[in-house]
Image: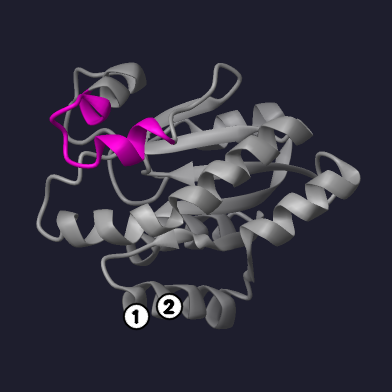
Amino acid sequence: MKSALLVIDVINDFDFPGGDELLAESRRTAPALAGLLAAARQAGEPVIYANDNLGRWHADFRRVCEHCGRPEAKGADFVRGLLPAGSDYFILKPKHSAFYASSLEPLLQHLEVRRLWLAGIAGDGCVLCTAADAHMRDYRVSVVADCTASITPERNRRALEHLRVALGQELLSAAALRQAWAEGGAGAAA
């Protein structure tokens, strides 16, 4: 079963109520997420960035990256450490779920992906909605728990627990997924 790493909303300006708290929690995930991105690329695993358009309807993904990575932007250090590589895919989304009104599903069909590894922010918002939509579309979904953040650790824990219990989605660590890819290459952890 072909798989892909779907990274949700890490290109972010954190310019909204609760943004400071979400940035603080997101920074805790940055080392694990950076390592996961590197391992996915090394294993030949497709990496797809699904990012909010931040209400910038005239912008493309590169402009969103530039906006969020500019020196004066809140969280620019976080964003610059997680920018996509040339081989990565990216989509912009207008709402919470990466599937809603976006080109994610046609991209997944093109790549023949049926297995998704989810990571990103916010765990109790966009990650949760994307995971539920993927479940409804019969994708096999796992959430990389230590690469997912919400405004508070408690909110993140509750969201992850809901995905595990209510939707039967697997929770795993970045280290476990990196190890699986290292032992068998792309799709080994499927």
Above or below, comparing residue 85 to residue 164 in the picture: above
Above or below, comparing residue 69 to residue 19 in the picture: above
Evaluate whether residue 32 shows in this view. Answer: yes
- Is 8 or 22 nearer to us in this picture? 22
* Residue 177 picture quarter: bottom right
Q: Are the residues flagged by discs 2 and 1 in contact, CB closer than 8 Å?
A: yes
Q: Position of residue 80 (x, y in %)?
A: 36, 31
- Residue linked to disc 2: 157
Three-letter amino acid code at disc 1? Answer: Glu
- Is 164 or 77 nearer to us in this picture? 77
Q: Indicate yes or no whether the magenta region holds residue 68.
A: yes
Mark 2: give few (<14), some (14-19) or many (20+) Cα within 10 Å: some
* Residue 167 picture quarter: bottom right
Q: Position of residue 185 (x, y in %)?
A: 85, 40
Residue drawn where x is 49% and y is 63% of the image? 132
Residue drawn where x is 31% and y is 25% of the image? 65
Write the start and end of the magenta stretch as one range.
Answer: 67-81
- Residue linked to disc 1: 154
Residue drawn where x is 80% and y is 46% of the image? 181
- Is 103 or 86 nearer to us in this picture? 86
Three-letter amino acid code at disc 2? Answer: Arg
